[in-house]
Image (spheres, helix red, strand yellow):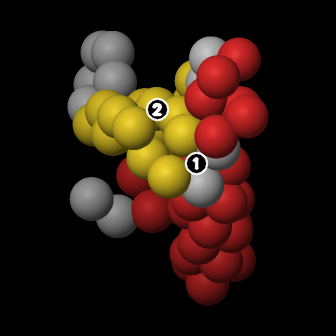
Amino acid sequence: MLYTHITDLHLAQSFLGRLTRIGTISINTAGKDGFEMVMENIPHAEMVRSIIESRMIDQQGGRE
């Protein structure tokens, strides 16, 4: 999956998940209904989401 194809990136965390920094990251790409990829119980989920978002931005910048 290319970062440029990602259209929706969602992080879900419960209260306990916020305390332990564990969450679920869901990714959707263009032309698909619902989330195409769901990664559950990801440690440091906020950091992982930030890394994915920064790579999405980097890829978009290289395309223009």
- The residue where tag 1 is placed is 45
- The residue where tag 2 is placed is 24
- Residue at (71, 32) in percent of width and height: 18
Q: Return the residue nearer the eye: 41 or 25.
A: 41
Amino acid of disc 2 = Thr
The numbered mark, 2 or 1, whose residue comes first in the sequence reads: 2
State the quadrant of the C terminus: bottom right
Q: Return the residue nearer the eye: 18 or 60.
A: 18
Taking the image as shown, residue 54 lies to the left or right of residue 29, namely: right
Taking the image as shown, residue 4 lies to the left or right of residue 33, namely: right
Q: Are marks 2 and 1 in contact (CB under 8 Å)?
A: yes
Q: Which mark is residue 35?
A: none
- Residue at (35, 34) in percent of width and height: 40
- Residue at (35, 64) in percent of width and height: 2
- Residue count near mark 2 (Cα–Cα under 10 Å), binned few <14, some 14–19, many ≥20: some
Taking the image as shown, residue 32 lies to the left or right of residue 20, namely: left
Find residue 6 and report its horizontal and vertical position in percent.
Answer: 46, 47
Can the viewer see residue 27?
no
Q: Quadrant of residue 53?
A: bottom right
Find residue 8 and report its horizontal and vertical position in percent.
Answer: 54, 33
Can the viewer see residue 22?
yes
Find residue 38 and report its horizontal and vertical position in percent.
Answer: 31, 33
Q: Quadrant of residue 55?
A: bottom right
Under circle 2, the secondary element is strand
Amino acid of disc 1 = Ala
Instruction: Give the answer, above or below, for where 59 lies relative to 4.
Output: below
Under circle 1, the secondary element is helix
Q: Return the residue nearer the eye: 64 or 13.
A: 13
Instruction: Give the answer, above or below, for where 28 lies relative to 35.
Output: below
Find residue 1 and report its horizontal and vertical position in percent.
Answer: 27, 59
